[in-house]
Image: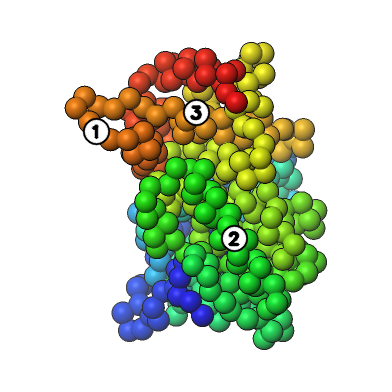
Amino acid sequence: MARALLLALGLGLLSGALGADDPAPAVIFDAGTGAGGKLEGQGVKVVTADSEGRPAALLAIDGGTAWARIFVRRLTLDVQPFQHLDLDLRLVAGEGQELKAQLLDADDREATLRLEAPKESWETRRLDLGDFQLDPGFDPARVTTFLLVWMKPSTQTLAVGKAVLVAGPAGWRHPPAELAKRVFGPQRAREVKNESTTHFDLWSDDAKAMKSVGASLEQDTEACALVLAAPKDGLTGFRIPVYVFKQASDYQEYCARVLGWSKEQARRTPAAGSDRGLVFYVKGVADAQLRHRLAKAVFAQLYGDGGGAWLQDGAGEHCVRRLMDRPTAKEFAPRVKTGEHWSMDALLQASSLHGGERTDASFDYRPIYLHAASVVEFLLREAPPAAAGSATTPSERISARFKALGAIRSAGKDRLSDLAVALGLPLADFEAAFKAWAPKAK
């Protein structure tokens, strides 16, 4: 099997075997010794007390809110040498419920794993870092925050004893043989075959379909690179592992078993993964969601994975529309005239385009994706003027600007000032130029 980039959601870079020089456990929080960082809460009251004879942080959670969380901030962790996160938990009172464990990097990108409800007796949950779902571009070498998050929490009290990172033979990602078992299941993994194309390493339980799937992915990759004005040799070194199920039902079972998705979510989301790898089923190879994830991976390869959700998801949405021969800015233009859209500041600052922590099913994220895609199209079609004395071509100037945007790692209002520098003009002027252009886009 290829030792390439492996998948987020349980897939990633292969670490060498650890031996005598294994790092000591890294304490994130320990109520007993006081080691690690301070445990803080939002929507949670945190007090220190004994729980069944053990020192603990007692978390009193009020029900009825959209979410609640506790966190340890200001960490400086490189989690790559570690394989497990050991978490001591106990339900003290109330009705326990599912929660999420998260790690945030310095750019607030997430690694997330769903946990079953805590039990009434103390237990150590051993979380495998290879099972965490990763945001594209998550940097394991710069972890700054640990969180536990409850969505729509019930009234309850939990005890947390400690959270500790522990080394293991695989490091923070799983080796290929283990990955195949996790993705396809131990029984089906015996039937999985491997084949490689120019940009993909494919594993599938449908050997006959691999050639056509690989060809389709290669075609879409080249098409996305063309849409995104890829510089010459821009895809050099671009390789993604791909895990392809023969049956949709088996893919959906994987989503529930490994990713913790509901059956409905698995049915509605025919592809999982990111720039680190893709999982889908054979007939989903031309699905818009898969193409969106692939396009984002291509953009990250060409120009970087920074700049914000508007840039990464906007590039993905624009590529999908071009592949389906659907207009982007032309379809968004009526919203410019009516004002039915986010402000440019709100769009460029957003950490997510799909509602973030909003939980109401009525939230419609599609116009926001279309807005972001239209801004990306504007940047592609309107090359910035050349600097004085420069002889660069429009395509070279577009490439340079996207690389400057893709290198931005800041968030919130800091991102706005950095984007203005990369764009070369104040954001108010950029927004005015975009709004003047969009109604005329063809």
- Horizontally, is 276 left or right of 209 in the view? left
**Residue at the farthest left position:** 389
- Horizontally, is 3 left or right of 45 in the view? left
Q: Which residue is mark 2?
A: 217
Q: Is residue 418 visible?
A: no
Image: 400 above or below 219: above
Tell me what residue is drawn at x 75 percent, y 62 percent. Answer: 283
**Residue at the farthest bottom position:** 190
Q: Which residue is mark 3?
A: 378
Q: Looking at the image, tell me whether mark 3 or mark 1 is earlier in sequence order.
A: 3
The type of residue carrying mark 2 is: Leu
The type of residue carrying mark 3 is: Phe
The type of residue carrying mark 1 is: Ala
x, y percentage for residue 141? 37, 58
Colouring: rainbow
- Horizontally, is 343 left or right of 410 in the view? right
The secondary structure type at the circle numbered 2 is helix
Alpha carbon separation for disc pair 3 and 1: 22 Å
